[in-house]
Amino acid sequence: MTKNSDLVNFPKVHPPPARVVSAHIFLHINFLQHPPATLPQKLSGTLQGQRAKFHSHPLTVSRPNMKIKLLPALQDNYMYLLIDEATKLCAAVDPVDPKLIMSAVQDEGVSLTTVLTTHHHWDHAGGNEGLVKLAPGIDVFGGDDRIPALTNHVSHGDELKLGSLNIKCLHTPCHTTGHICYFVTSNDEHQPAVFTGDTLFIGGCGRFFEGTANQMYDALVNILAALPKNTNVFCGHEYTVNNLKFAAHVEPQNEAVQEKILWAKEQRSQSKPTIPSTIGDELLFNPFMRVREASLQKYANLTDPIEVMKFIRIKKNDFKG
């Protein structure tokens, strides 16, 4: 591990209380040193022919130096290709369908060098071993030793490089103890992105399977809410409409919720993704990021925001929509 003073200055984030990471420790991996993966020719060009079986249409979000390709998988999952336009190197985020990932890699004409895994659950990490077989030599990053094919264990504050892109690892335990979100910026200072897995959803958050309301509060309010407000949020599932139905139940007078749910329903009627959102927008309509607001505290009849977080998570677990 080496400290790289040339990396961009990321917004200050607060390490979760369950894990203290020294501020001077960084992981700086230069993916340019890794050979490109060998891509099986037979997998190329299959995306168009397979779209009908997916829950959503694929989507590409482009910036001058960064491209993010959203790939639907399973019943409601999203995988991503993160592409550095300057070098044509790419990383796969939660690649549960290895063949689809490799097909997209070949269609884009890029070199797959790494996997960014948010957490160990099978619908996010279950494709790692298969992808490593299809693309020998790639690195698999994550914050939990339960992640299949893991080669590099990362912690809160670790920094990675993908060509000209900067990736900061944010430890957000609660859904799982080793959950990592990946915050990505480019040197041209265009709109950043964060891959949030099952910590932050559009309009909601993940269940507290291995953590507490205090940890989710820290993840959402102290860490993710501290990112630039224009940061695009790329989450792990298409849960938006149901999440916003709950948000409307909690805050029936919130116009931002009402506008977003109308938009989301229209998107889903056309099988279009509701991803990405932004951190700034989530602060307007996501109840789990609004637990300090008077309207949320009135709904819960509580004033401690962490207790509000606990209360609305229980209510959401039982919500039928």
Image (spheres, rainbow, N blue to C red):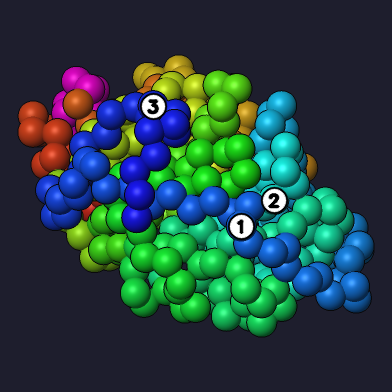
Q: Which residue is mark 1?
A: 33
- Bin the neighbour count of mark 3 within 10 Å (Cα to Cα): few under 14, some 14-19, many 20 and up: few
Dot 1: few (<14), some (14–19), or many (≥20) neighbours within 10 Å? few
Of the image marks 3 and 1, the number of the one nearer the N terminus: 3
Q: In the picture shown, does residue 76 fall above or below 149?
A: above
Residue 61 appears left or right of 251:
right
The label nearer to you, 3 versus 1, is 1
Indicate which disc, 1 or 2, sits on the residue closer to the N terminus.
Answer: 1
Indicate the secondary structure of the residue bearing disc 1: helix
Mark 2 and mark 3: Cα distance apart in space: 23 Å
What's the CA distance linking mark 1 and mark 2? 11 Å
Q: Magenta part of the protein: which range? A: 293-300
Q: Which residue is mark 3?
A: 9
Q: Give the vertical position of 62 relative to 111 (above or below).
A: above
Q: Is residue 30 above or below residue 77?
A: above
Q: Quadrant of residue 52?
A: bottom right
- Label 2 residue SS: strand
Q: Nearer the viewer, residue 200 or 158?
A: 158
Q: Is residue 308 left or right of residue 40?
A: left
Residue 90 placement (x, y as % from top left): 67, 52
Residue 22's x, y, as percent?
18, 46
Label 1 close to label 2 by CB (< 8 Å): no
Q: Is the magenta region chiefly helix, strand or loop?
A: helix
Residue 282 horizontal/vertical position (percent): 42, 29
Horizontal side, residue 286 vs residue 96: left or right: left
Q: Which residue is mark 2?
A: 89
Which structural element holds mark 3?
Answer: loop
**Residue 55 makes an appearance in the image:** no
Q: Which residue is pictured at 67% across the width and 36% down the height?
A: 66
Residue at the image position 22 percent from the left and 22 percent from the top? 293
